[in-house]
Amino acid sequence: MKPRFFSIPSARLADEAWLARGDGLGGPRVAIVGLGMMGREHLRVALLLGRMQIQGVYDEHDASLRRAAREYQQVAQKPLAIYSSLEALCADESVDAYLIATPNFTHSAIFERLMITGKPIFLEKPMATSLIDAQRMVTLAQAYPSFVQLGMQYRFKAQYIEAFHAIRVQKALGTVRTVAMSEYRPPFLNKVGEWNKFNRYSGGTLVEKCCHYFDLMNLAVDGVPTKVYAQGGRAVNFLDFEYEGLSSDIDDHAFVTVNYDNGTLAQFTLNMFSQELYEELVVTGERGRLVASESSSFRSGVGSSAKIQVEVAAHPTYGGTAVTYPKAIESSGHSGATFFEHVAFLAQLEGDIVDAATPAEGFKSLLVASAAQRSLATGKVVLMDEFCAQEQVSWPC
């Protein structure tokens, strides 16, 4: 059995993954549903890794299909196979696994449609925009004959591989007491139909953008969230934005605090009207502090820079160590995290156990994000037991 991702340093992980690349002529045959910005990133990464075959793709948006076909042709030197319908995709018995990268509000319906095949599924985050839909998906996945991997790719950023290696494997901090997570970045990018500018389609900013971070916080704490409080709202972005008669209603900044049943306190800061990208995870325990950070940019040609620092006596990264993935991996998408999501997906197809997010973990991050979104809207503390009862869901599930 190969080691789980958090059990080895990111540099060694990168070396082994790069050496294990293939030529794209063999491996499992994967079909991709959704060729927007994220779907095309998955397509590019699959070609870079070269260890799976793209059996075909499907998208209802012709412009996305045309762009994906051009990009694929340039790299693969062959045409991209396109299914005429979702039904045709499901009927192709030669497909070994599916990857769903459609807009958030379509996830649950497409997921349940593909489940009739009984084949492995990779589902982009967030798993749904409705907690009831998400819990039903968890229940279905628990009885599913194949595995389901959730697209929480930030787990696979170099600094977080190192962070969870230190926290969960080395236990360098001892018992975790506090967690602070932050992201500063420019506004949402343009998406097909501008769905990410509206709460009804995205689930809200704290669901769409921040479920990644709540997943990381949950991993660091390893407890059950009991209370959530959020402040923030709309200050700068898309205040006068309209699309097809609808006015944008997404939030662009927030402070969120989360209490866990083991006494750990966590806090998240979001700002989406910064010029550059910066994110940071700070975890303190009985023995000291860990800081995992990344600087990045949407500007062309500007790469990311990742760092880990574990301020524990005699720890080798006490003074801070750069852990950025090699450029070919780092530049492939989301600072190289998508590359390792694919490595994890392939490892699961081969029967290995990896540290990819499960549907239950995806639901947990969605639950915290949804409670934060509720608190932001009402200005009140959200007690998770009461919130789950109101939403007709349960946790733990």
Image: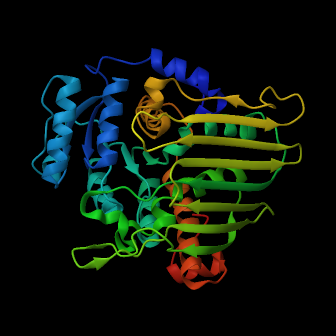
**Image coordinates for residue 195, horizontal then vertical, percent:** 31, 65
The picture quadrant where one finds residue 96 is top left
Determine the residue positioned at 34% across, 69% down. 201
Work out whether residue 219 or residue 266 is closer to the camera in this orientation and state it.
Answer: 266
Give the answer, above or below, for where 248 lies relative to 10.
below
Image quadrant occupied by the N terminus? top right
Q: Is residue 327 left or right of residue 45?
A: right
**Image coordinates for residue 181, horizontal then vertical, percent:** 66, 54
Q: Is residue 38 left or right of residue 142?
A: left
Give the answer, above or below, for where 129 lies relative to 39.
below
Image quadrant occupied by the C terminus? bottom right
**Image coordinates for residue 260, horizontal then vertical, percent:** 73, 64
Q: Is residue 72 left or right of residue 148?
A: left
Colour scheme used in the picture?
rainbow
Residue at the outermost front position = 275
Is residue 371 visible in this depiction of the protein? no
Q: Is residue 351 left or right of residue 165?
A: left
The picture quadrant where one finds residue 26 is top left
Give the answer, above or below, for where 28 lies relative to 268.
above
Determine the residue positioned at 67% across, 80% down. 381
